[in-house]
Amino acid sequence: MAHTHDHDHPHDPIEHGGKPGEYEFLAEAMRQLLIEKNVFTADELRGQIDKMDSRSPALGARMVARAWTDPAYKKRLLADGSAAAEELLGISVAPLRLIAVENTDRLHNMIVCTLCSCYPRNVLGLPPDWYKSRDYRSRAVSEPRAVLAEFGTRIPDDVAVRVHDSTADMRYLVLPARPAGTEGWSEERLAEIVTRDAMVGVTVPRVK
């Protein structure tokens, strides 16, 4: 689901923390129960967590940098993000569907999960605390420009802002616009300026 909004009015600051909620407690209880029932061992669980923790935004940055330098790959990424991730990184995101959305001079995209914290962990690693906060999840939809401004990102009035709501089976990745002044850069150098926040759509890449 996607929303396009254009609001500009006073707002409360984004909250970057909070106590564990009901779902966190339920998840922990379920983990303990599954371990007790020998569905998997604590070591197996830790191994999977370590594997997921090894994922980082550097993976998504490689995809963005490749798309900036290879038009054919960019076309494949926008057509099927899941296949593009497996092609370049050897990472399967199945059974999830990874959808890449492109920023242009007429459109800026940003990502949210209004119900919980669905996030493309396979290519971006763990989500930041602010992404999971109730404040971001509600305000990203109702006043996206105000939220973007808090990240230092001001979108011109003639550029639409589209908010994509992640679901249980779909994850989004923003393909930012390539900054001016990066002509002739290598993929490795380009990847260095692609941040996690830019691939969520709350900031844009900047030339260092």
Image (cartoon, rainbow, N blue to C red):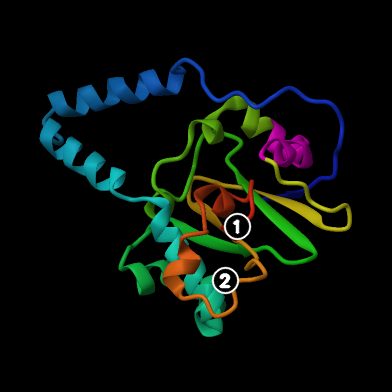
Q: Is residue 194 visible?
A: yes
- From this viewpoint, which residue is outermost toward the front? 208
Q: Is residue 81 visible?
A: no
| Region in magenta | 139-151
Residue at the farthest top position: 19
Tag 1: amino acid? Pro
- Who's the residue at 52% across and 59% down the image? 193
User: Left or right of 94: which side holds 182?
Assistant: right
User: Residue 37 falls in which quadrant of the image?
Assistant: top left
Q: Nearer the viewer, residue 124 or 21?
A: 124
Horizontal and vertical percent position of residue 95? 38, 57
Q: Which quarter of the rendered picture does the C terminus lie within?
A: bottom right
Q: Residue under circle 2? A: 78
Q: Position of residue 59 (x, y in %)?
A: 39, 59
Q: Is residue 40 above or below residue 60?
A: above
Task: Kindly identify the residue that appears in the image at 50 percent across and 79 percent down.
Answer: 73
Q: Main secondary structure of the magenta part?
A: helix
Query: Residue 178 appears at what percent x and percent y?
Result: 62, 68
Residue at (25, 39) in percent of width and height: 49
The residue type indicated by label 2 comes to Leu
Are circles 2 and 1 on residues that touch, CB within 8 Å?
no
* SS for dot 1: loop
Q: Is residue 84 found left or right of 14 in the rendered image?
A: left
Per the image, the residue denoted by label 1 is 205
Residue 160 lies, with reference to residue 8, above or below; the image says below
- Mark pair 2, 1: CA separation: 19 Å
